[in-house]
Amino acid sequence: MIKNVDPDDARRTRSRSEPTKVAVLRAVSELLAERGLRQMTIEDIAAKAGVGKSTIYRRWPSKGSLALDAFLEEFLSTQPAVNTGSLEGDLRQALSSWVVTVDGTATGRSLASLIAEVQLDPEMGFAWRENFLEVVRAQHRQIVAHAISRGEIASDSDANLIIDMLFGPAYHRLMHGHLGLTRDFVEGVVAMVVAGAKSGAASPTTRSRRV
Amino acid sequence: MIKNVDPDDARRTRSRSEPTKVAVLRAVSELLAERGLRQMTIEDIAAKAGVGKSTIYRRWPSKGSLALDAFLEEFLSTQPAVNTGSLEGDLRQALSSWVVTVDGTATGRSLASLIAEVQLDPEMGFAWRENFLEVVRAQHRQIVAHAISRGEIASDSDANLIIDMLFGPAYHRLMHGHLGLTRDFVEGVVAMVVAGAKSGAASPTTRSRRV
Amino acid sequence: MIKNVDPDDARRTRSRSEPTKVAVLRAVSELLAERGLRQMTIEDIAAKAGVGKSTIYRRWPSKGSLALDAFLEEFLSTQPAVNTGSLEGDLRQALSSWVVTVDGTATGRSLASLIAEVQLDPEMGFAWRENFLEVVRAQHRQIVAHAISRGEIASDSDANLIIDMLFGPAYHRLMHGHLGLTRDFVEGVVAMVVAGAKSGAASPTTRSRRV
Amino acid sequence: MIKNVDPDDARRTRSRSEPTKVAVLRAVSELLAERGLRQMTIEDIAAKAGVGKSTIYRRWPSKGSLALDAFLEEFLSTQPAVNTGSLEGDLRQALSSWVVTVDGTATGRSLASLIAEVQLDPEMGFAWRENFLEVVRAQHRQIVAHAISRGEIASDSDANLIIDMLFGPAYHRLMHGHLGLTRDFVEGVVAMVVAGAKSGAASPTTRSRRV
DNA sequence: TGTTAAACGAGACGGTACGTCACGTCTTCCG
DNA sequence: CGGAAGACGTGACGTACCGTCTCGTTTAACA
């Protein structure tokens, strides 16, 4: 849930709100899977969850934030922390997990829909970065940190750049659909990123010296 | 315009439709810039263009396809073919042009909105890839082809992969807004892609031999 | 046709306009019968008659006046002048002809629709009275005139009243549909009108003397 | 209101719907008077009543049925039960009341418009007969019943025929506008009907014996 | 017989109103 | 007294016709 981070408020209403919240999020997940974000209406959700519309509006400010909450629960659990002992292994596993969760699945379509919603509803931007993006990226930054501590790559390598080089192309294909998220694609991206990172291209100082 | 590519039809109605089409697309461009895709209504457009709603519905099947047409005109002209004589120079120039056009501009917001629209309206997918994505990618494939013919990279390098490695991270930052499209970012991406491509990581055969 | 009574104009365009006019009126008759005045659109008519919309608008000012023209042709021919030799016989025959033409027929529905149209379109009132009502009533006034000249009824009998007493109830049942236009109804109305007229109730002087 | 005669339903929603219903019907009455049924749009009504369009569509199936409801309230109260002690007096008073309410008034124009609407919208027929025509006719049948019980006319006189003979001509003049609803007209109609009824012309058995 | 102006079919156009939908708010009434 | 139920005001939707207006293209009357 995006609003109501005040713990007092959360504690005070937990007993009543928990079953309602669960019912609503379950309804949202199902509707999101079966007809997509745009075709899903608040009235549908209320009816399916056996809940009044005002109960929903009391807890979530928009359809998007509601969908975000439902999505977070089902997505984040699928992305385990990884530690294979090598940068290449870690990157491959992180990207593969993402592809498996997302390629051709309802979760994948929800992810795309939510990124779309963020573009169209300015109020969603902050919640999206805070509750989804930063959570995932924090894990991924660990991968780079491990590679540095292992001495695989330069200590001033730009972790943000490396992560974006790994996932950017994947999100790109997810959203434009021009090419598939194949095993070959994963291998290619990983190989490119590893080669680039080890060559020092992700390190600002190395790079500027070269230029 | 997406529909009506039949030249006969176009010729028969050209004289009437041109001024109307221009007026509508201009109105769309302005409204898109000043209030965004979701806040722009067909009625707004009709009123601003001095045109009946039915005239719009007669020519475009949805708000998205209308926005796409308006966007294409204003975007494509900003992305020149490049040929600097080196892979690195070409990639840098292509990505820089894109960043300049898109970073912090109305065009950039329109681009993000349209990609969003494509996720939410299944009928837009084909038109988007056909009229936008493939047009741009065809140019970019030339960059890779030139690099191969110069002998800079392996002849079986995967052009699609290289292009997605270059632009994927950029679209990623555009849409999630977690980090800026800075000069440093451009340099980093280009360096990574060049290093990866020259190492053979973009070439399936080289890659599989290594694995 | 309501407009264009100028004979010059008619002569100048006769050869072209006749077939067009006929085709349009035929199309109107059919559409009127098969779907009613409200469901019939000018575009339907133009399409069915194989004629441009503007050709229709050039000749008729409204859908109602067009329907009126079509209706007149098919209705008036069914109402013959009557002369049975008695008031009662004449009235019975006039009313019977009307009922036969109108009861449960497409013509009847068209008649009701046109009277309706006259209520809703103020411009139709004059054309309706001039081209339909007065034509029919002129015939009916003859019936009363004959009865007077035969000495059946007082010479100052109010012909308009007698005609309205005969047809008023019939139009009433046609339009409200509360009761049928049965043989018994016709007999009852005729008997009432004959009794009233012969009693002098239709004659202002007789009436006022009684009061 | 035509729909929702179920008392449970009415009770459940009474408190909310009453003010809304009243506001809408008032707006309809005014618009009907000032611009007529055809020129009155649902959007006008909603705006004037300070109500959403959907609220109107939720309660009334068409513009006609809405106008009917508004009309009933303003018309029925003007037609009192009559009992003067004689058939002639009763008929005169009933017809006079009608003429006064209808001749040259907004109510008269509304009445004509509604009868028109019934012709053009098949779904209105039943509601019209049930909620308007039968209500009025039930009163008028009393007039005939009283005349029979007084012995003024034959006991098998056809009340429906007598009523149609009285009002048919009046509706006829209202809708065609060929002649006025004058005092003389009223006297003539009443005299004709009384003469006919007392002569036995309204009685099937008497009539058939004569024929 | 060839020229020319009208009337024509076709249908795009700027509009208006339609009836539907989902929104987010607000009121009622039940458990 | 909190919540389901759902009516409400709002406003955009996409459709259907309206009546007007260009477009070429016949076509028939005159040169």
Image (spheres, coloured by chain):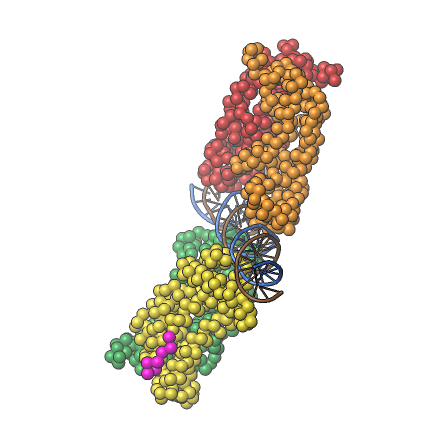
Chain colours: A red, B orange, C yellow, D green, E blue, F brown
Where is B137 relative to B157, above or below? below
Give the position of the C terminus of chain B as an image quadrant.
top right
Judge by depth and name the residue closer to the eye, B144 or B210: B144
- Number of residue marks: 0
Where is C111 relative to A105, above or below? below
Residue C148 seen in this snapshot: yes
User: What residue is rendered at 50% in x and 38% in y?
Assistant: A40
User: What residue is rendered at 39% in x and 66% in y?
Assistant: C108
Question: Could you tell me residue C33's position as x and y percent?
Answer: 40, 61
Where is C148 relative to B205, above or below? below
User: What residue is rendered at 40% in x and 74% in y?
Assistant: C168
Residue D93 seen in this snapshot: no
Q: Residue furthest bottom?
A: C209
User: What residue is rendered at 61% in x and 49% in y?
Assistant: B16
Q: Is residue A13 magenta?
A: no
Q: Quadrant of residue B40?
A: top right
Q: Which residues are magenta?
A: C80-87
Give the position of the N terminus of chain B as an image quadrant.
top right
Question: Could you tell me residue B205's position as x and y percent?
Answer: 56, 14
Judge by depth and name the residue closer to the eye, D21 or A146: A146
Q: Is residue C82 magenta?
A: yes
Left or right: where E3 falls relative to C183: right
Question: Could you tell me residue B15's position as x and y percent?
Answer: 62, 48
Where is E23 relative to D22, above or below? above
Q: Quadrant of residue A48?
A: top left
Question: Could you tell me residue C122's position as x and y percent?
Answer: 53, 68
Main secondary-structure element of the magenta-colored stretch: loop
Q: Residue furthest left?
A: D209
